[in-house]
Image (spheres, rainbow, N blue to C red):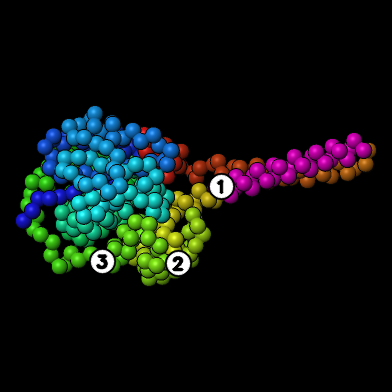
Amino acid sequence: MTTRHLVVIGASAGGIETLRELVAHLPADFPAPIAIVLHTSPQSPGVLPGILTRAGKLPAQHARNGERLRGGHIYVAPPDYHLLVEPGRLRLTKGPRENRFRPAVDPLFRSAAQVYGPLAIGVVLTGNLDDGVAGLWTVKQLGGVAIAQDPADALFPSMPQNAIRHVSVDYVAPVAEIGPLLVDLIETPVTAPEPTHAVPHLVDLEVRIAREEDPIKAGVQGMGEPSTFACPECHGVLLQVKEGERVRFRCHTGHAFSPESLLAEISDGIENALWNAIRSMQEGALLLRTMGQHIDQRHVRGGGGALAARGDELLRQADTLREMVTSAPEGDAAPATSAASPARE
């Protein structure tokens, strides 16, 4: 029996406020290390460790590559780096983005499950889309404890909702109760890992990809069957990866997408393409009008008017596209934030 746990936590939109409340309920003698991934932009100033240190009784800091894990310390993934767990240590990598983010929640959770097995405790908090689901599923499959914030308590409920929908979570709780719950779990002895919790090849493979190994040399092409979709980031073929009853995607260069993150990326691509088409039509209309004015100045009968008419038609087409882009479906309210918006530090 042992109590040497590791707690891994993932959050996105609304995460700063939620993490601040969670750590405020942890005691100064909390014995386990805590590793946190909060979705941030690469340009984030990285102020979360200071916020968490002031909010609670445990020291928080950005994780450093190769740093030893210490109980009672909070380690935060720095901007634009995946945070992974190795035996007794932390590792930072520039591995491929997952679910449109680096740092992403899934790589941290998978590596924690790989190393700690039944001693890993995964927590999914507030956020959009479904990053963290695959990682929490792995934590659960390898005997760890899966916790999701009560969606009714979350500022952005999508991440915990998806975790509850796709993972047999052990606990659903408001954030004010998660801190005391972690204390109880840490104090509960756990049976040592059994052979039934052997790490699957797929988990090892995905952790190796996050560690910056060449995905093709690591064997990414054996992860699943080719899909009909192209990777939105590198345009390579996406492989379909089956995980229980759920399907997700990874390309041969390593980018990974959940179904919701892939849909969000494709939707963004469609919108960008439409705006580019609008811009091209407007530029074409301006060029036609300029050419028409030039012809009129040279007194070429009828030439300028024909070009102006063609320009007006282009503007009408651009207005039609603009209406498609800017009008929300009937009954839909404008979203409070983009589906892919990171938390703001």
First in sequence, mark 2 or 1: give its number: 2
**Three-letter amino acid code of the residue under disc 2:** Ser
Quarter of the image for residue 174 reads top left
- Magenta-tinted stretch: 271-298
Relative image position of residue 234 (x, y in whole percent): 50, 57
- The reply to whether residue 308 is in sight is no
Element type at marker 1? helix
Magenta run includes residue 321: no
Q: Nearer the viewer, residue 86 or 38?
A: 86
Q: Given the image, on which type of amino acid does mark 3 rest? A: Pro
Q: Dot 1 corresponds to which residue?
A: 272
Amino acid type at circle 1 is Asn
How many numbered dots are placed on residues in this image?
3
Quote the CA–CA distance across marks 3 and 2: 23 Å
Give me the residue at 49% from left, 50% from top.
267
Secondary element at image label 3: loop
Displayed quadrant of residue 244: bottom left
Say whether residue 292 is magenta. Answer: yes
On the question of residue 280 being in view, the answer is yes
Residues under numbered marks 3 and 2 in contact, where contact means CB atoms less than 8 Å apart: no
